Image: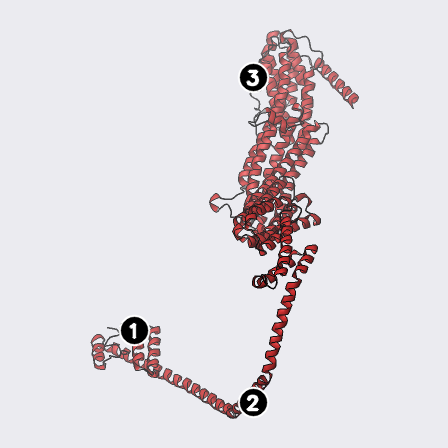
Amino acid sequence: MDVDEAPLDEKAKRMRDLLSSFYSPNPSMSSNHGNSFSQYASIDDINSISFEPDQYMNILAHKSNLEGLLQRHVEMVAEIKNLDTDLQMLVYENYNKFICATDAIKRMKGNMLGMEENMEQLLEKIMSVQSRSDTVNTSLFEKREHIEKLHRTCNLLRKIQFIYDLPDRLRKCIKSEAYADAVRFYTGATPLFKAYGDSSFQDCKQASEEAIAIIAKNLQGKLFSDSESIQVRVEAAVLLKQLNFPVDNLKAKLLEKLEHSLTDIQLIPEVIENASLSAHEAAIGEFVEAIRAFRVIFPDSEKQLVKLAQDLVTKDFLIIEEYVKTRICAADLLGVLRVVWNDVLRMDEVLQEASLPNHSLEAAKVAVKLYVRNAFSHLMQDISDSLLKVLKRDGAEERSLEVALDASIKAVLQGGRNFLLDVRKILDDNLEILDKLRELIIDRVQEGFQDFFRQLEVQFLLLSGRNNYSTNQYHGLTEGAQGDKAFPSLVLVLAQLSTFIEQTAIPKLAEELAASFSGGSFRGYEYGFAFVPGEISKKFRSTGDKFLQLYINMRTQRISLLLQKRFITPSWVKHKEPREVHMFVDLFLQELKVIGNEVKQVLPQGMRKHRRAESNGSSASSRSNSIREEKLTRSSTQKGRSQQLLETHLAKLFKQKVEIFTKVEYTQESVVMTIVKLCLKSLQEFVRLQTFNRSGFQQIQLDIQFLRTPLKERVEDEAAMDLLLDEVIVAAADRCLDPIPLEPPILDRLIQAKVAKTKEQNTISS
């Protein structure tokens, strides 16, 4: 059975203990220390005091086999060699130390030679000096006593002379109003007056008391004078107290005077210049000196002084709160905060019990929050003003929408950047109170942007009319709007502005926020991030789509009202033979022109897509079908004509279907095409609600045929436009009592006449 080997560090401990026991002068200490290194020492432990060799060998032979005994023998031989080596090294080291100690002793012995003789000579010289000093003191003792006696007599005479001159000195101080000197002179003579005032200096005491009474009266006058400064009043109170005047009963009046004097310490942020700032600092200095003096005169006035100081700081921060409600920059805010903070530090030196820095910190939080909130309000107002300017112009300028959009984009992006730069100046300032508010400012800026964009969306909805507010509130915000002419254009601008905010403004502002306003933890991590760009972007993406659809609906509704009025007014069953294109076509094209001008200013131009080849119902095929139908009409009977129109109607059912309610893109062509689709679809529905005679049907045919050419210039999908126009004619034929179309020559002549008339009107107007 193998013997467990002791760890390496245990062997090292055992070796050190053996060496220690070898060199230890106290065998008991070494034995105790040797026992402490192993907690399991026993009779078979070779390092134990109670070690028994025979018993150890019996136990070892009983536990181990021959191979184990040989292994243990080898280990013990190695340990003996190591111990011999360590002992030898220890002896060599001690030998070197002994040699060094011997050399040091030899040097000390050499240096001590001659020291005793020098010490004896020094002692003789000291004794000689002492003897001569005693001789001098003995010879000068009598003269010194005489001089001291004369000096005491001189001082006494000087004091007596001062007492006799005191009344005159006091009167001179009264004339020059040097009351501090007068009180100092009188208090210095008071001990003599108490000792000899009733005998030797009776007259001087009486005259001095009369002068002091005048001085006390004058000091009381200064104390209660409104024209005197705080410092002068406090000095008068101190002097009266030195004269043992009962000033404790004046405490309430003095505090009232001090409180009244705070009205003179007025912080005027708009005129903080060198002159006014010096006056303000002087007033604060007087107030600080008054506090210091009050604490000396009235030790129990601490509570009232604390209240006065806190009220002064509160008043200053209330002024700052009113100041930040105006449109100011960060430099203006830093200026007033630095002035107030310097005042706080000066007052805190003499009145630490008021905790003015902490009190100011709480008030500064409110001021900074208000500054950030008002800065966002001003930014919101700038954006609203840039949008409302286009309403006041009433579309008089051709580029008014483009100007309004550019101004709004600049107000959002550049205004947001300017705000961040302005607040960055506050964070970079070395003002101590702002350094404590750093995390609060960062959180407020991030929260402010989140709330700002939410409120901006509400403001957009308010301007567009899609809100729950009253009509009066809406008119108040959209002051200058001129009816439907300007309002749909504003909705279009809002749609494009919302898209810009979602795609450009929010990512750039979020990037700058992350770069310069990160690290805020005032809100706590449990509330999450203060500014969430993804949420705001999603909101404005949805808002922009709503505005674009609202613009389309508003313009379509206006045109639909025009079409409805056109079809309700006449009696179509008694309609006369068509002579010219109806006026509603001009109005319809005029509305489309207005729409085109608006989208041209606001929306980008997309790729024009002509999908005539993709559609089975083109204008050419439609026109050829119409001509073929007209030829059949002239060569057939009434029954044949009706059958032909029915076949035409059935053929159109197999044409490519036109998607009316498709997704609108933010391009000029997409918006115009969507409006045209909706208007033509409304026109088709109005036609289906009427009953036409032959002339009414021909009038519809003439109007629709004339619309083909101008509409081609405005839409991107001519095939869809042709199909919708054909459906209007088919719907009119279905509702006609005698659906006989106009002959092509007559139709072309009427259209050419209308074209010539339109050119003539355009020439005259230009």
Please give the name of the residue rendered at 63% of the width and 24% of the height, measured from the top-left corner. Answer: 555
For marks 1 and 3, give the one nearer the viewer. Answer: 1
The relative height of residue 579 versus residue 412 in the rendered view (above or below) is above
Instruction: Tell me which label, 1 or 3, sits earlier in the chain.
Output: 1
Q: Nearer the viewer, residue 28 or 596?
A: 28
Spatial distance from mark 1 to mark 3, Cα to Cα?
114 Å
Spatial distance from mark 3 to mark 2, Cα to Cα?
152 Å
Q: Nearer the viewer, residue 423 or 115?
A: 115
Residue 179 seen in the figure: yes
Question: At label 2, which amino acid type do we have?
Answer: Ser
Question: Does residue 3 appear to the left or right of 290 in the view shown?
Answer: left
**Quadrant of the image containing the C terminus:** top right
* Residue, far front: 199
Q: Mark 2 points at which residue?
A: 128
- Residue 202 location, x and y as percent? 61, 61
Question: Does residue 335 appear to the left or right of 87 in the view shown?
Answer: right
Q: Residue 650 carries which label?
A: 3
Residue 430 seen in the figure: no
The relative height of residue 757 versus residue 665 in the rendered view (above or below) is above
Question: At label 3, which amino acid type do we have?
Answer: Leu
Instruction: Tell me which label, 2 or 1, sits earlier in the chain.
Output: 1
